[in-house]
Every structure is written in structure tokens, then in C-alpha cells.
Image: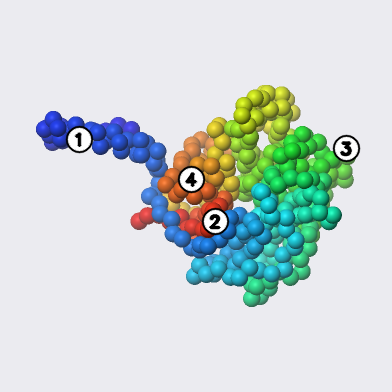
Amino acid sequence: MSIRISSRVSSLPGGAMRELLAALLLLGPAMAGAQESGPRLRTEVVAGGLEHPWGLTFIDSGRMLVTERPGRMRLVGSDGKLSAPITGLPKIDAGGQGGLHDVLADSDFARNRRIYFCYAEPAANGSGNSTALASARLSEDGSRLEQLKVIFSQKPKVKSSAHFGCRIVEAKDGTLFLTLGERFSRMKDAQTLDNHHGKVVRMRKDGGVPADNPFAGGRNGALPEIWSYGHRNSQGAALGPDGRLWTHEHGAQGGDEINHPEAGKNYGWPVITHGENYGGGPIGEGITAKAGMEQPVHYWTPSIAPSGMAFLHSDRYGQAWRGSLFIGSLKFKYLARLEISDGKVTKEEKLLTDLKQRVRDVKEGPDGLLYLLTDEAPGQVLRVAPAS
């Protein structure tokens, strides 16, 4: 940051000049950490009183569904009013990082009223849990789920309250991607294909396996739903402007990553990573690259604890921000804006650094504005708008 002092200011008496320079020095760090480009922003509270909201999806131009991690789903009206908890949810194992997670309205929701949601599914015998994906129809009055069907259940179930992953994306061809954590205690499973830990899976909307999945037919003993592997705990996923899947995942101590998961490819965890064990010390082979394993598009050290992910398609914030990637930070409580060129991150900007709330999800609304969920109790739905 450079400061130009005019001749009028430089002629101030010595004491006044010293006070001015002291004020500028205090202001400097705040200005240096502020937004670098684009519009000034303000946040507007759309809805409050939520308990650790986790995922949101719009069902029309003004209404959205929001999940709360303890196991509730609510309809948020265009006036911001919260409905009573929607009935008809399956049994959910809420505890630690687990509970009710992401929700997605079908691309043809206006006709079929179908939604998809993922959650921590308890084992039938009460021993362990895993991430599951369900399909249901939202009733006409929005009060209950109908025709509930579990279309995917992560295998195997383990005793863990961590690393569920659980972001849902509908691809252009109508198939569904689901991110799956490696359950923390089973990180080595991310490198083997006989389980769903540390994977991205792809399926049809009825739960069937697409014929063009890389391991369709169980090749080499692999589970056929697997799309990519070697992931840690992916809590952000979105389609890019080119229609390709983008995800991000939590590292351990450092090494949060953005990836382009491609069919059949290995993204390295826990063999290679840019992070280290909590408290220090190498993970895996203690290296950051190895033949046959993909490098991240971008990584953060120290970790920002990323969650939520959305590409901006509108020009509501000006043409310069169109196509930008937005990611929430749980740890540092801001919204990151990343510029992408030729599939690479070329610039990163920290927005809303004075928010002081953990950002769990970010979505672009039908109005072209960004909407955030804050992972607090009480948590909020926030609309991000240009300040002028």
C-alpha cells in the first residue's frame, strides 16, 4: 500500500503531522487486509435462529431448504420465515461432525419436487455409522418428505464421529456426485478401492451405477460407484463453468486442497500431502508428489478449514467477478474469492473478514447474489449484496 501526501497536508504543523501519520499507520494493516477489487459488500440476514445449518438449496425464486446438523430440515420462505421442521426424515446419527448435511433440489424440481440429501446413517445394530444419500419428494405444502429412498450407503460403517464429507452435485448428464470422507481413523482406506472411504462416488438418481463409471463392473475388485479416490474430507463441491466437477477438502495441519476429480484418478491422501500431523510430523511418505497421484489445483497452508463452494455465473457484482470461485472458511471466518484461468487459481481475495462467523456453505441464488450459511448456534442465512 502506498500513501500520497499532498503539499497541503505536508505543510501541517509537526504535532498534527505526527498524529496524522500515526493514524495512517494504524489504518494501514486494515486497508492491506481489506478487499482488493470489486464492489464493497454488505450482508443481509435472510433468516436466523438455526442450529448449526449445514446445507442449502433453492426450490424456486425466493424459497430454500436449509438443513441443520442436529437432524432437522426447514423451509425458508421468501420473507425469511422458518417453517417447522419438515417431517419424514430417516434416522440420523447426530454427534460430533455427523448429522444432517447437504441438500440439493433436483434440476427438474418444479415438475417432480424431488430433493436429495446426505446424512450420517447409523448402523442397524447401533455399532458405527457412515454417509448415506437419500432421495425424496417434498410435499406440496412443504411440510413433509414423501417417497423416501436411500439410494447410496457408504461401506463399511465404522465407529467415528468425524470426516463424513457429504456434498452433492448434479452433473449436466443428470448423474449425481457425492463426496465421502475417510472417517479420520481409516485414512489408509482412501488408497484402496474395496471401500467408499475417502472417495468421490457417482451414481444415477435411482442409485444405479452409470455404465461409464471408471470402475463399473467391479474391475479389479473396486466398488463400481467410485469416481475418484485418495481424498481426505471433501466439504465443498460444484460444477465449474465448463461443466467439470471441482471439489475442495480439508487437510490435516495445513494442506487444504482444491481438486478437479477426474474418472479413476488418485488424489494422493494420505500418501502425499502438503500438510502434516496435528502437533507436527510427516503424514504418509512425508512427500508432496508421487507418480500416479494428482497434484491439487490449489492448496492452503496454514489451513483455512474450507466449507461450501460455488462458482458465480451472474454479473451482479460486476463483470470482473463473473466466473469466480467462492469458498467459505470455517477457521478464519471469511469468504474467499478465487479467480480461475485455464483451470488454475491465479488470484485469491479474502472477503467479509469482519463477519466473525464460521462460513459453512455458499450458494448462488436465482437472483444472482451469493447466499451464506453460518455454522453457529444460532446460525444464519445471509445474503451478500453490493453495498451501493
- Mark seen at residue 220: 3
Depth check: give the residue in front, 180 or 242: 180
Q: Residue at 58% across / 58% down in the picture? A: 51
Q: Is residue 173 visible?
A: no
Mark 2, secondary structure of its residue:
loop
Q: Which residue is mark 1?
A: 19
**Is disc 3 surrounded by few (<14), some (14 to 19) or many (20+) residues within 10 Å?**
few
> Are discs 4 and 1 less than 8 Å apart at CB?
no
| Three-letter amino acid code at the position of disc 2 | Ala
Q: Which residue is mark 2?
A: 377
**Measured from the top left, where is residue 271 in percent x and y?**
72, 29
Instruction: Answer with left or right where residue 371 lies relative to residue 136.
Output: left
- Mark seen at residue 334: 4
Nearer to us: label 4 or label 1: 1
Marks 2 and 1, the one that precedes in the sequence: 1
Distance between the Cα atoms at labels 4 and 1? Answer: 32 Å
